[in-house]
Image (cartoon, grey):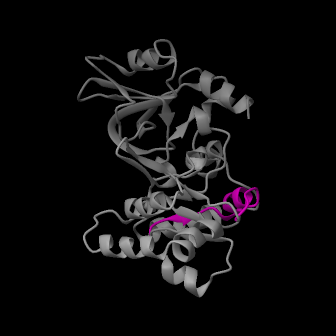
Amino acid sequence: MELAYKKFPRKKWYILLDDDTYMVQPSLKALLGHLDAEYPYYLGNAVGDYRGRFAHGGSAIILSQAAMRVLYTDNPWTAMEGHMESLSAIWGDRLIARALIRVGVFLDERFSHLFSGEAPQLSKIRADRFCSPILSFHGLATRPNMLQTGKHFQEAEKPVLWSQLWDIYDAPSPWRHGVASPKREGWDHVGRPDEAVDVISGVSDSDHCAEKCTIGSKVCLAWTWDASLKKCYISPWMIVGEEATGRTTGINAERVKRLEDGC
C-alpha cells in the first residue's frame, strides 16, 4: 500500500485485491463516479464482530486519495507501527483496518453489499441487495474459473446487478413464468449454510421442504432438500448454484418476482 501511494501519490483511488478476485469494471466506475476522493473513504465487504470490523481482502478493498494521505503523509508513525505488526499478523486485511482506525478512518459499511466474497455462481443474492450493482467476485483460484468469469463480464458496458447473475449464467428464472415453486433435481440454490439458514430435520420429501419455504417462512428465497439426510435447508438468499448429487432445490418464485418488480 505504501509503495503504491509513494509511486502514484496523485491517484484518486487505490484498490487492493487478491489474485483470485475479479472486479466488474462498469459497476466499480459507477460507484467511484458518485464519490469524492477527497473524503477519506475505506470501502469493502464488512466482516468481523464486536472486536473489530474490517473489509474482507478477498472481496477487494478500496481506499480514497484522502484516506491514503491521512495514513502515509499525515501519520507516518502509525504506518510504521503497521509494518511492525505485519511481521506477526495473520490477516492483512484486518491489519489495514487497525492502522486506519488509529488515524480516524473507519470502514463505511453502507457500501458493503456491493462486494461479493464468493464466485459468481455461489454469490448470495439477498433481498437487501437484489437490485444493487455487484462490484467483485472472489474464490476464482484456477485459471479456467478466472477465464470463464472474464468471458461473462468483460463485455459489460453498464453496472451489473446482483439479480442479473441469473441471466448471465443462463440459470432458470421461474418467477418470470408464473411457477410457484419449481424443483430442480441434482442442484443446489442454497449453497453453504450458516446461522441464517434454517435447517429442518426429518423432512420426508422435497414437496414438504418447498412448502416450508413458500408458506412457512417470511424470509425464504431458496430451499434445498437433502434426500439422504432428510434435511430441509431454508435460506434468506439464493445462488445460481451448482450440481449437487442427492439434492433437490427450488426458488420462492413469488417473493423473487416482487423483488424484481421493485427494481
Residue 10 appears in the rendering: yes
Q: Residue furthest bottom?
A: 7
Q: In terms of depth relative to the viewer, which is nearer, 161 or 15? A: 15
Q: Which residues are magenta?
A: 19-37
Residue 187 occupies which quadrant of the picture? Answer: top left
> Residue 124: percent from the left, percent from the top?
49, 42
Closest to the observer: 229 or 12?
Answer: 12
Q: Position of residue 12 (x, y in %)?
A: 69, 71
Q: Is residue 20 magenta?
A: yes
* Residue depicted at 41% across the width and 59% down the height: 98
Q: Position of residue 137 (x, y in %)?
A: 52, 58
Q: Residue at x 68, y 30 (%)?
A: 176
Residue 224 x, y percent position in the rendering: 39, 30
* 197 up-or-down from 34: above or below: above
Left or right of residue 129: residue 48: left
Q: Is residue 14 above or below residue 199?
A: below
187 drawn magenta: no
Which residue is most to the top?
A: 215
- Residue at position x 34%, y 45% in the image: 51
